[in-house]
Amino acid sequence: MLKTLVRLAVSLALLFFVLRSIDLGALWLRVRAMNPGWVMLALAAYASTIAVSVWRWERLLRTQHIEVARKTLTQSMWVSMFFNNFLPSNIGGDVIRIADTAPAAGSKTVATMVVIADRALGLAALMLVAAMAAIGASVSGIHVPGERWLALVSGIAIVVGLPFVLMPELVKHLLAPIRALKRPWITERAERLEEAVRKFHAAPSDLVAAFCGAVVVQLTIVGFYLLAARGLSIPLPVLLGAVLIPVSLVIQLAPVSINGFGVREAVFAFFFARFGLPTDAAVALSLVATGLVMALSLIGGLVFLGRRQ
């Protein structure tokens, strides 16, 4: 509870800091003048990420020899999106996905491992897109603050993550102290975890495909923001969008705010000001894009209610 209150305080403080420095009248006029055609295209682009995410999840489940109907996975992904947007953390959505696939997996441990792998690939794809965009901007003569940190973190993620897939026996050694406790339920879960890693190791093509799917999702999200910017008549260059969106998403991963509110607007305002774009446009794009995603995620809420009935 205390952690949530602290995050809420950070979000409110950052939003207050950003909003007090802009012309709220100009912000409101920009939002009122939105072009509905571009907005619908932006929504369609974001909705398409659900299909790609379901396909990616399906490939990862296949590595564990788990078969789940695509309809079930699609419904689960929409419900997960709803919970991720309306709860103060993304854990709620992951719990839904695990609960929906655990029966087919025969194990919550294995279902959890698949969701964690999916999350890890998504994070790696996000870091890669952000790093490559920052490098591309640098080559074009645009300096992106923290670009070296992005490259460093991306490299560390690869160095840390690859050994677990390339050398599954490493997991067995790491779990040895836990096995030494000789508790049946701990031993059973350790064995399931080791088996899951071995199966990932045995299906490199599926892992590569899932990673490529994650990259497509991140690039599509960049496209979503660019379309939303067009709808708001914001002249956001493609290169700046390709840098700004992934970088802001990486920064939002820091657990210091409620679903990125405040942090996202501050990052957008910083980059827009740096490249000579109005700050009210930055805040408008951030808030409108977030509102569109939350509105779209209401589909998941309806799916959730329908499943309960």
Image (spheres, grey):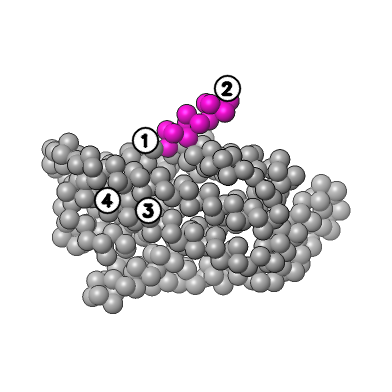
Mark 2 vs mark 1: give the one in front: 2
Say which amino acid is labelled 3.
Ile
Q: Is residue 304 magenta?
A: yes
Residue plotted at (40% across, 45% down): 47
Q: Which residue is mark 1?
A: 295
Is 55 in front, or is 268?
A: 55
Label located before the other in sequence (3 or 4): 3
Label located before the other in sequence (1 or 3): 3
Query: Which numbered marker is on residue 221?
Result: 3
Tell me the chief SS of the magenta region: helix
Mark 3 vs mark 2: give the one in front: 2
Query: Which numbered marker is on residue 309?
Result: 2
Disc 2 element: loop
Q: Residue 121: where, in percent of width, then height? A: 53, 60
Q: Quote the CA–CA distance across marks 2 and 1.
A: 22 Å
- Asked if disc 2 and disc 1 are in contact, CB closer than 8 Å, the reply is no
Say which amino acid is labelled 1.
Ala
Q: Residue furthest bottom?
A: 139
Query: Which numbered marker is on residue 227?
Result: 4
Q: Quote the CA–CA distance across marks 3 and 2.
A: 33 Å
Q: Quote the CA–CA distance across marks 4 and 2.
A: 36 Å
Q: Quote the CA–CA distance across marks 1 and 4.
A: 16 Å
Query: What range is drawn magenta here?
Result: 297-309
